[in-house]
Each structure stands twice: as structure tokens, then as C-alpha cells.
Image: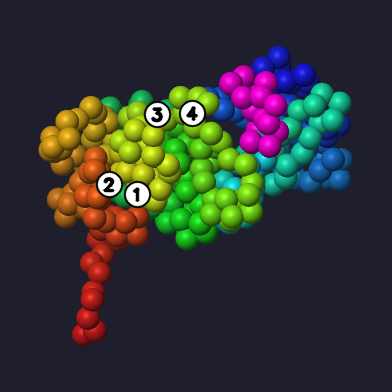
Amino acid sequence: MNAAAGPPNLLAGRYQLERILGTGGMGVVYRARDLMHEAFGEPDCRVALKLLGETLSASADAHVLLYSEFALTRSLRHDHVVRAFSFEVDTTHQLAFFTMEVMPGLTLDRMLAECPQGLAWQELQPMALQLLDALAYTHRQGVLHGDVKPANIMVGEQGVRLFDFGLGHGEAQAKAGLPSLSRSRLNAWTPAYAAPELIAGGGPSASADLYGAACVLYELAEGRRPGERQQNQRLRRPRQLPRHCWPSLCSALAMDPEQRTVGVAELRDALAGRRRCWFLS
């Protein structure tokens, strides 16, 4: 049995599926009750549970690909990155899945749909800093997200959460020889947020992650995406973005990766209003 046929209501004799939280090109995420934790009196027994979607569930290596995403995420410990719990297999139904924290709130794409003029700077700035903090952390851990876009960012009372590393890449996993997704198997990228070099067939990189984050921040500040551009077309400063932040964001939005002269940390500092000092006073 596979996820495309619809999973059973109870997985591994333990997880009671309640409802779908989200779907994507690669997977389906359910909210579920952990009946074992519930039996032991845990106050919060709900988890998010990810299964492969119809696109990949029929593949012979489907379980391995799902484990690859779990392995990429399980070591990440950051307030603004989703936390993965465990990888499991329901042997009766031959279904692999992994569990992670339930993230209350709504995805950023849904929030943007309600903010056609963009967000005011006092609302936008903390979200931007949290997103860039999360991205800088994952890069320090040797993990590339690979698909930074509003649908992969959750917004709630505790701030933002970056999730869905299904198109990600990890240095440790690559060195260990763990399998990763062959992107030629599906049209994975979202053109509005994917760096041009990814669409052209290049691999994930910190610079491509930066470009995706910059597209998200531009949309937050302007209320619309940067849009289709010619190679040398100039963008205007978004209406909600302070002038001193624009040079760094504009650099991060360069279509040529060689012209992205800032990194994630530098963009974060610019949005925080900090200037790097290269001398001691």
C-alpha cells in the first residue's frame, strides 16, 4: 500500500491520523495523536507526521528518499527550524514516515495573500531576522535548505519556523553516501523563488538559499514577488523597506550568483541596522 491510495487511520499501532496539515510536490503532512504518549498522560500528544506524496510513493527507493530528508533535519536544533522526532515504518501497510513538531500558525504564503500592500517594517523586521537566523544556522551545520519559499515558512505566536527540507542537501549525508533526491525526477523548483542557476540545472548552494530568502523578504516588503526579469533589469526598492537595507537585499536578489556579494549573515546585519566594523575603536 502507498500514500497515494490513502493511508490508514492508525499507523504503526500508535499514531492516529486526524487531518491533513499540508501537501506539496513530494509529501503530505498530517496532524496525528501519539496514542502511546497519550496513554502515559503526556499533556501534549500531537505530532506532525510526513508521508511521501503520490509523486514519489510508488518509487522503489521511496522509503530511502524520505529517510534522507529526516536524516537532514534530525540534528537541527534551532528555535526557528522545525524539529524532527523519529523515523518509523508501518510494516503492515509498508508505509514509511517521520514525525516532527506541530507548528501552530499559518504558512507565510497564506499570510501574504491577506497583505497585498506588504507588511509594515515593525512587523516585517523580526520575521526577516528570524528567517535569516534559521538559514544561517542550517548553513553552519552544513545543511542547505534547497527550497526557501513562503509555503515552507510557518508563522505563529513563537515567530517563524523554516521547514520542509525535502530538496535539501547535507554535507554529512553526502560524505556518508546516503542517497539524495535526483531533481531530474520531478519539476521540484518554484520558479518565483528558485535561483536562476537552480532552474538551469545547478545544484543547491548557500547563494541559492540566500536568493530564495531575498525573494521572500522582497514580497513581504512590497506585497508582490520580484517577478520575471531580464538579466540586467533593475528592481525598485520595496515600499516597506528602509533605504539603508535596500543595497544588501538588492545584492541578494542578483540573478547572477557572482553578483550576490552579500551572504546570509551580512543581509541579516543590514536588516538589523548593524554595520560591520573592520577596525577597533
Task: For the residues labelled 1 and 4, say whether their Cβ atoms are less than 8 Å apart.
Answer: no
Task: For the residues labelled 1 and 2, say whether their Cβ atoms are less than 8 Å apart.
Answer: yes
Q: Quadrant of residue 70?
A: top right
Asked if residue 193 can be seen in this view, the reply is no
Task: For the residues labelled 2 and 4, say whether their Cβ atoms are less than 8 Å apart.
Answer: no
Element under disc 2: helix
Give the x, y percent position of residue 160.
Answer: 46, 45
Q: Which residue is mark 3?
A: 190
The label nearer to you, 2 versus 4, is 4
Asked if residue 207 can be seen in this view, the reply is yes
Whichever of labels 3 and 2 marks the residue nearer the N terminus, that label is: 3
What amino acid type should be assigned to the residue bearing mark 4?
Ser
What amino acid type should be assigned to the residue bearing mark 3?
Thr
Between 238 and 95, the one nearer to me in the picture: 95
Task: Specify whether 24 is left or right of 209.
Answer: right
Element under disc 1: helix
Highlighted magenta segment, given as a residue range: 50-65
At 39% across and 39% down in the image, what residue appears?
202
Label 1 – label 3 distance at C-alpha: 16 Å
Give the x, y percent position of residue 96.
Answer: 74, 32
Disc 3 crowd rating (10 Å Cα; few below 14, some 14-19, many 20+) is: few
Give the x, y percent position of residue 90.
Answer: 81, 31
Q: Which residue is mark 4?
A: 184
What amino acid type should be assigned to the residue bearing mark 2?
Pro
Whichever of labels 1 and 3 marks the residue nearer the N terminus, that label is: 3
Element under disc 4: helix
Mark seen at residue 207: 1
Q: Which residue is mark 2?
A: 257
Coloring applied to the structure: rainbow
